[in-house]
Image: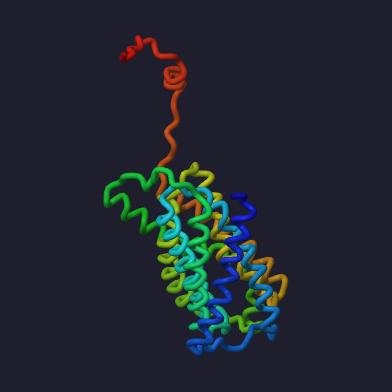
Amino acid sequence: MKTGFRLVVCWIGFAVALILSGFVDGVLHLHAGPLPGGVSVQTLFLTQLVAGVVLVVGLWPLARSLAAPAALRVAAFTTFLLLAFGLNGIIEALKFTDLLDEGISTAVAFYVCLAVILGAALGLLFGTAGQLAGLPHRSWPAWTWRVAAAWLGWPVVYLFFGMCIAPIVTPYYNAGIAGLRIPSMSVVVEMQLLRSLFFLAGTLPFVALSKVSRRSLWLTLAVANAFTVGFYGIASATFLPVVLRVTHSVEMTCDAFAYAGLLVLLFTAPAVKLNASDRREQAAPSSAPAFHSR
């Protein structure tokens, strides 16, 4: 099956999840709240379809790098879309905007539908059923400090790059454009500590299932996080000023690459490099006599 066709199938899965979540909203009488920026329902639907292309393309390199049974690949993407993408997005929107003040239930319905349908499509259509690599064998103390470092690492990365762009974006938030707002620093820190748990739980399975090198894993994880956390929302947020969309795109890309690099350094084992003599031994033909059974 051609790669392009598989990507189209995944995008159709995204569209089905979008439509299905609207059906669920109607059946359960969920209130979506006012549309952001005064955009129409038709415009919002079309921009979300475009954002779906961005999401699928961003997750594709990670999906094709996995080597595990299909069930594990599906579980990894479903977990990632539900936690790292869905819950993290909801938390961020609740604290920094008023977009979900009246429509959190509709957001939950959408992310659940998306996680199940798109997660299944990505897990089934990409990757191989190769031998599971797993995580390196380490002692409990070694795992404990690594998990703690990863948990604390995301807030540090987030706050660092957030401070870098603060002079540009803060005036827009203070003006309340498109329902934007800035919570207190204590709320921001608490929020990022919580989001960090979801990021870690959603991303770590890919470290165990990936079959690529550390550098490739870093790149694919970074791209996946940048597209899900950043570019997907930016692509559909046409009601935001361009300067905010561009600035946050740069910020979120930096966040994604820094955090993915931290995870790779903490949880993967460096490749073993052979010295010159080892390489010569492997390259040289064996001098031992060969015995053949008759």
Left or right, 252 with respect to 291, comes to right
Who is closer to the viewer here, 74 or 82?
74
Residue 49 appears in which quarter of the rendering?
Answer: bottom right
* Residue at x 43%, y 66% (from the top left corner): 198
Report whether residue 152 is seen. Answer: no
* Residue at x 37%, y 48% (from the top left corner): 135
Left or right, 209 with respect to 220, comes to left
* Residue at x 68%, y 74% (from the top left corner): 46
Measured as percent of width and height from the top left, residue 257 is found at 55, 55
Residue 191 vertical placement versus 63 (above, below): below
Count up the numbered dots. 0
Measured as percent of width and height from the top left, residue 179 is found at 62, 84
Quadrant where the image shows the C terminus:
top left
Q: Which residue is outermost to the left? A: 140
Residue 294 vertical placement versus 203 (above, below): above
Report whether residue 15 is seen. Answer: yes
Who is closer to the viewer here, 71 or 112?
71
Measured as percent of width and height from the top left, residue 51 is found at 64, 68
* Residue at x 63%, y 63% (from the top left corner): 54
Q: Which residue is outermost to the right? A: 242
Left or right, 13 with respect to 243, comes to left
Residue 119 vertical placement versus 24 (above, below): above
What is the basis of the colouring in this image? rainbow
Measured as percent of width and height from the top left, residue 131 is found at 39, 43
Residue 179 vertical placement versus 51 (above, below): below
Who is closer to the viewer here, 33 or 63?
63
Residue 42 appears in which quarter of the rendering?
Answer: bottom right
